[in-house]
Image (cartoon, grey):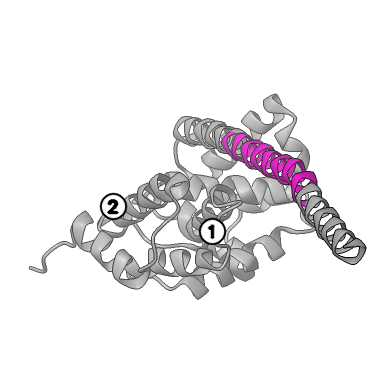
Amino acid sequence: MDNIRTVSDTKRKFYGYHTRPINSIYRRFVEELLVEMHLLSVNVDFKYDPIYALGVVTSFERFMQGYRPESDKASIFNALCQAVDGNSEQYHQEAEALINEAKGLSMTEFKDKLGQEGGDGILWGTCNAIAQNPKFKYSRLFGVGLYTLLMEIDPELVKEEEKRNQTIKEVSEALQFSSDKLQKDLDLYRSNLDKMQQLLTVIEDTLEADRKKRMSQKLEKTPEVVDEKGDKENKENEEQQQSSNG
């Protein structure tokens, strides 16, 4: 029997792939996402699918907004995927393919087709495989991916709570997993996004105030430098005049 990879093993792999320090504001999110992906990867009922991949990509992009240096984001995402024996290119490509197939669909078309077998493309192939799998392992990241798809199809769902909740219920039933769990996960996801946005706003305001303070201090010092230079020039002129008079 193979030894099951531990959280420590996965973290060690992650920090082996991404060796630069992680910005402290974002470190908790990165490590929580890593642990979540790890626990799923060692679960016997879990099976990677493109909707899960979309959830991972979306979560990472939304919660890593404003990360500096920007160039480190790709390295961190690659390390997250590699640490659980995944491929970051596959995650991105399949997430993008799902979004492209969802574009142009109406919510009615989407829900109607969910209940039908067959269908071409990555979207319908994924949904049909999930609906027909009695051991499908639902996860929060899958829920985020599904929510991202629904928002792509009907962006107005963000503003219409009753319609959104009804849609989530119908889609969950069609895919045969608990709508209550999905609803709770999405409520927490939206709440955490709001908190992260508020934190980034506070940080940006603080940085802006600090920039203005430094600029103000610089401007206050500038006249003193000019005055000192002027005094020196005046003194030199006086000395030259006294010398010529003498």
- Magenta includes 211? yes
Residue 36 visible in the displayed image: yes
| Quadrant the N terminus occupies | bottom left
Is 183 rendered above or below residue 102?
Answer: above
Residue 52 in the image: state x and y as whole percent: 48, 56
The local secondary structure at tag 2 comes to: helix
Q: Give the residue type that dot 2 points to.
A: Leu
CA separation in Å, label 2 and label 1: 17 Å
Residue identified by numbered label 2: 39
- Please state the total of marks drawn on the protein image: 2
The circle on residue 57 is 1
Residue 74 in the image: state x and y as whole percent: 52, 68
For label 1, the crowd category at 10 Å Cα-Cα, with few meaning under 14, some 14 to 19 and many 20 or more, is: many
**In the displayed image of the protein, which residue is found farthest to the left?**
1
Which is nearer the eye, 56 or 231?
231
Is 56 rendered above or below residue 227?
Answer: below
Residue 18, image quadrant: bottom left
Magenta stretch, main secondary structure class: helix
Is 6 rendered above or below residue 199?
Answer: below
- Magenta includes 65? no
Q: Residue at x 26, y 54 (%)?
A: 43
Q: Which residues are magenta?
A: 199-225
N-terminal-most mark, 2 or 1: 2
Residue 118 visible in the displayed image: no
Is 244 rendered above or below residue 160?
Answer: below
Residue 19 in the image: state x and y as whole percent: 35, 69
| Quadrant the C terminus occupies | bottom right
Q: Give the residue type that dot 1 points to.
A: Val
